[in-house]
Image (tube, grey):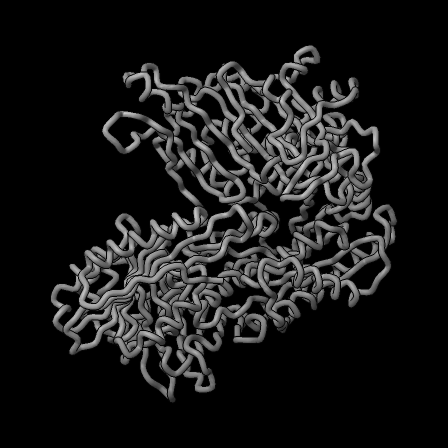
Amino acid sequence: MAVAAGRPTQRQQPENPLTAGLERQPVPPTSMVIFGATGDLAQRKLLPAIYNLAHDGALPERFYLVGVARKEKQDEDYRKECEEAIRRYSRRPPDPDVLKGLLENVRYIPGTFDEGAVYDKLGQQLGEFEQAAGEPLNRAFYLSTAPGFFPVIIAKLGEHKLAHHKGEEVRVIIEKPFGTSLEEARELNREVLAVFEETQVYRIDHYLGKETVQNLLAFRFANGMFEPLWNRNYIDYVQITAAEDIGIGSRADYYDKAGALRDLIQNHMMQLLCQVAMEPPVNFTAEEVRNEKVKVLEAIPAPMPADIPEMAVRAQYGPGHAGGEDVVGYLEEDGVPPDSTTETYAALRLDVDNWRWAGVPFYLRTGKRLARKVTEIAVTLKPVPHLAFSAEGSLGVQPNQLVLTVQPNEGVSLRIGAKIPGTRMIIRPVNMEFLYGTSFLSQSPEAYERLITDVMRGDPTLFTRNDEVEAQWRICDPIIKSWEATPGPLPKYEAGSQGPAEAEALLRDGDSWRAV
Amino acid sequence: MARTDAVWSEQGTTPDAIEAATRELLIEAHAEREEAVPARVLNMIVFVDLDWTGEIANRLRGVGRYHASRLVVLAYEPKRERLDARVTISTDDPASPGEIAVLRETVVVELGDRHLDDLVTIADPLVVTDLPTLLWSPHGHHDIVEDLIPLAQAVLIDSVEEPEVDEALDWACTLSDRAYVVDLAWLRSTPWRERVAAMFDPPWLRGELSIISKVTVRHHPRSTVAAGLYVGWLASRLRWQPARLVSHGGSLVGTAHASRQDVAVRLQVAPELAVPGLEGLTVETAAGHMLRLDRGRGGLRAHLAGPQVVSGRKQQTDREWTIPGASRGETGVLGEGIRQALLRDPTYLPALQAARSMLL
């Protein structure tokens, strides 16, 4: 490929005065390669996200896409697959002309991920894109494959000199799970960082791309009224819930190996915990934000084996009812071994041992087949020190509770006590609510649209750094090991219920789980 | 899909009665459907000639999710003596069970000449307190806008709809002193601004922003102001000193003074363009680069020509490609205008001032 020589690189350029005031900032010309291009994630999320960026005029001036997967097929066949996936899963009906223009720059390379010829063809194809564009292009390799292929693909990219590209940026996006244990995460980090520099690596946690998760930082650090209360003096406990009403569907193969703790707590829920507990960063650059998150994780002591029964609970759903239908239990789900001891529910009590949070328990729980789908953070404040109302009037007084709902009905609600209208002073809790749906005109972009744009623009703020992912595993790993060492029959909860009664044992006296 | 949940109307009514009825309808709607909650984003006051109410209603219906949370339409019929009003509460059905359904309110008040002196006292009780208010008078009525502007934080205008270029620019400047101006003529050019910003963003071209030598903007016959705002934007961002343009062969031509050289400016009518706004633009640099953008199917058509250093050798390049992006259409532009009332673009006013220097 002919590449311009002696030109300034992206890191040396003077400011572009034309970008001021523009909502959509320029994105450098990019070739994106999706490994696992025919998989579920690519079809349901990545391709629709890329289309929607094109629809909004938010893709780079020059954008090319290569799909890599095992199945043998021609470019044209893959383009048809892309079109079908976009038509089916895009958040809006595609514009035929935009779709056609996007698909013209899509190519497909068949082969297994350990096959050298695949990478030779890939290098050649990327070169042809640059020839067509007449300029060098940044490269983004998206690893949307089973985790077992991550090291293979990384190593091959390195062997075939695809990890660096003259003066242009090369980035690699790694989907979760990043390892299944601390040891694996460390090993994977070693393998990745043997080929790429940390600044090139984008470990994706799509929760961070959600508007409501990003709003946590705005909520905490753009409002003067909350931060003075945001500490052990005023906050009694914090509860983070990620409940799903559905079962495992067709994901038995993945889920039975992962379980609830690996599936949601190690990554998404740890991220939410960090956003709640982190100190204000000096600024919102990627490194400052991620430094503060790592400090939170480092302040959480790794669980000792003897303590685990008191701070972690697991369970499995049994038969029950959901959406007015009878549903089977986990062990009766298709593809699940009848003697599986994989947890479909996990709850933890964690301590953040630092000046701000000492003594404030953080309760985390997640589960399949619970009563309702909801992801929320509930911050319960300490009760008022003295109730001057009559005994009857005081009955309805409850501690203030701030609930940040991530999904559905994204928003923030504050529970406060208010007098019931009437001749007597009787209090009951009421809610002050902010709802995204009623407070903004814009539709939130899909998390993947934001994250793919950030990769192409080189902004890693919403991605997990190597030390962060290892710190997450350092907390979860001892629990997983302890559970694996004592596989015994798991506590059961009825499908469609609030979860296992055993979860109550994690709570301090006076604390309670919010109703799912 | 929007559905109408409740309607109230009254002839010979008062603002207080309208406000009370609106409040009551909202309470009833929430009582009937717990998931129905009122949107609280933006008030929009529209002053419109009664005969055109239907047309404006159609345009506003098309903006979908950008519908103001409370829309107050003041429908004017000169000889009308009585104040008549109609309040409609509508919702979008929730996306899925358990999610909220957002309520939006439309208040239409029919009024006449006798009400104009006290128009603020009619409109003020009808807007939701503490929400920003956007004011729009699509059929001129500058005097009415002047009267109502104390109620508004933003004013929606379309500079290309003014009969004369100088009036359009003066009016936009006057309004800018008193409220944030959202100009549809400016918003139509957003993709063009984004694209030129992006095309000059690569490191090897960015330096050439300082040596732009010629700018040609092709525009709809009635969109001279839009073309002027576009060049005004370049001038203000790149610190050119714009000078007055003169008519020459059906175009407006002139020179802007940059720090390193003069920039030839041409605003050229594109008679074939059927919709308001820009048809294309060409930017040339002293280094010999030519960037051209034109409307195309599925996005803007880009053309880049000029010297490029390739593998250490200088050679001439000439490339064309399509930059994907769906057309928003006029409805999309109006919706964007409503959304922009909540934002602030610091580059509009400097662009407007530069455009005035060229076009007045």
Asked where in the image residue A174 lies, by quadrant, the reply is top right
Task: In this rendered view, identify the residue nearer to me: B245 or A459.
Answer: A459
Screen quadrant of the C terminus of chain B: bottom left
- Left or right, A502 with respect to B19, comes to right
Decide: is A37 above or below B185: above
Task: In this rendered view, identify the residue nearer to me: B94 or A198.
Answer: B94
Asked where in the image residue B184 lies, by quadrant, the reply is bottom left
How many numbered marks does the figure carry? 0
Residue found 67% across the figure and 60% down from its top: A88
Asked where in the image residue A320 lies, by quadrant, the reply is top right
Task: In this rendered view, identify the residue nearer to me: A303 or A107.
Answer: A303
Give the percent coordinates (x, y) of residue A417: 34, 28
The reply to whether residue A10 is in sight is no
Q: Which residue reaches farthest bottom?
A: B249
Decide: is A480 above or below B313: above
Give the percent coordinates (x, y) of residue B230: 40, 69
The reply to whether residue B297 is in sight is yes
- Left or right, A451 with respect to A117, comes to left
Give the percent coordinates (x, y) of residue A287: 55, 34
- Left or right, A185 with respect to B105, comes to right
Residue found 22% across the figure and 73% down from its top: B76
Give the percent coordinates (x, y) of residue B59: 39, 71
